[in-house]
Image: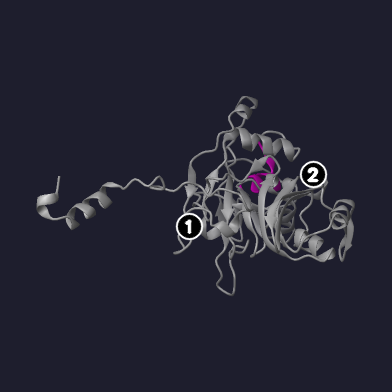
Amino acid sequence: MAERLQKVLATAGLASRREIERWIEAGRVGVNGKRAELGQRVEPSDRVTVDGKPVHIPGPRTRPRVLAYHKPVGEITSRSDPEGRATVFDSLPGLKTGRWISIGRLDINTCGLLLFTTDGELANAMMHPKRRIAREYAVRVLGDPTPDDLAKLARGVRLEDGPARFESISESGGEGANRWFHVTLREGRKREVRRLWEAVGHTVSRLIRVRFGPVRLDRDLPRGESRELAPGLVADLYSAAGLDLPPGLSEKQKDRRRPARAASKRRTPGRKGATAKRDRPRGGKAPARAGSDGRKGPGARKKAARKRPRNDRR
């Protein structure tokens, strides 16, 4: 069945439909050796190229994939960086076709949940302001905000790019100079959480995204690792984005929400392991690590045995 070229390429995970339309108008896309036209329909048997490179056209049963990634502080949400800094894409599992597209962004000093998908149409719909998808953050601020400060943040303040407010705000612990709050937004403007707090005179010292739409950050997902979402959660994302379920997903799969196993591990030295204390709110628990119950593994027992005198070994 023939489909519009921009929809096919968006589904393949190359970019959003709007971006692909710009590619077509700029002459970067070809079909069967000829320059593509806007609105042109293609089939899986057609040969499609972008910038002269062939692009695989997924068949009708290709199921979109979605990853939940626990972004650590220090990574940028970009495919490359002229300064040579680590990017979130360095730690994602490889794909035979298409590419991972980030659903939204987190700045270099923010950690927490970041979603990736192979479906550009889903990514574009999830980020569109009209969908008002909820983003929840755990925030540590310096100082002791007054009830009037919290009321202003809930009521709305004016930023340089227009009015903004928290959909919800609640205290979640802390003492002394640091206080933790959970806040919810329904848009994704640049550094919006930090700028809102600055508008009432407080600086954000730690910011963690803990939820995006129906997906929450799992406590047992270490920093720098990703996990593929189960079909049920993927279906929930399509519902939240106002999109029809794509081929490969069905209504029956909406009940299958248990996450799959971890999909990748960071390859950057010094960033392995469970969530650090500084990346979680006060009172939160770090994920259990192998051996955290105090029992020694076989290697440790052998090492201890070598240290004992021979006549004391059992």
Give the number of callouts. Answer: 2
Residue identifier under label 1: 266
Question: Which quadrant of the figure has residue 119?
Answer: top right
Q: 22 and 79: which one is in front?
A: 79
Quadrant containing the N terminus is: top right
Secondary structure found at label 1: loop
Cα separation between marks 1 and 2: 32 Å
Q: Residues within 10 Å of mark 2 (few under 14, many from 20)?
A: some
Q: 10 and 80: which one is in front?
A: 80
As drawn, the residue found furthest toward the left would be 311
Left or right: residue 81 compared with residue 268: right
What's the magenta region? 1-13
Q: Is residue 212 shown in magenta?
A: no
Q: Can residue 49 be seen at all in this image of the molecule?
A: yes
Quadrant containing the C terminus is: top left
Question: Which quadrant of the figure has residue 54?
Answer: bottom right
Q: Residue at x 65, y 42 (%)?
A: 215
Q: Residue at x 59, y 47 (%)?
A: 68
Does 127 sit above or below residue 160? above
Q: Residue at x 51, y 50 (%)?
A: 95
Amino acid type of the residue tagged 2 in the rendering: Arg
Q: Can residue 246 be seen at all in this image of the molecule?
A: no
Secondary structure found at label 2: helix
Left or right: residue 39 compared with residue 227: right
Q: Position of residue 64 (x, y in %)?
A: 60, 41
Residue identifier under label 2: 131
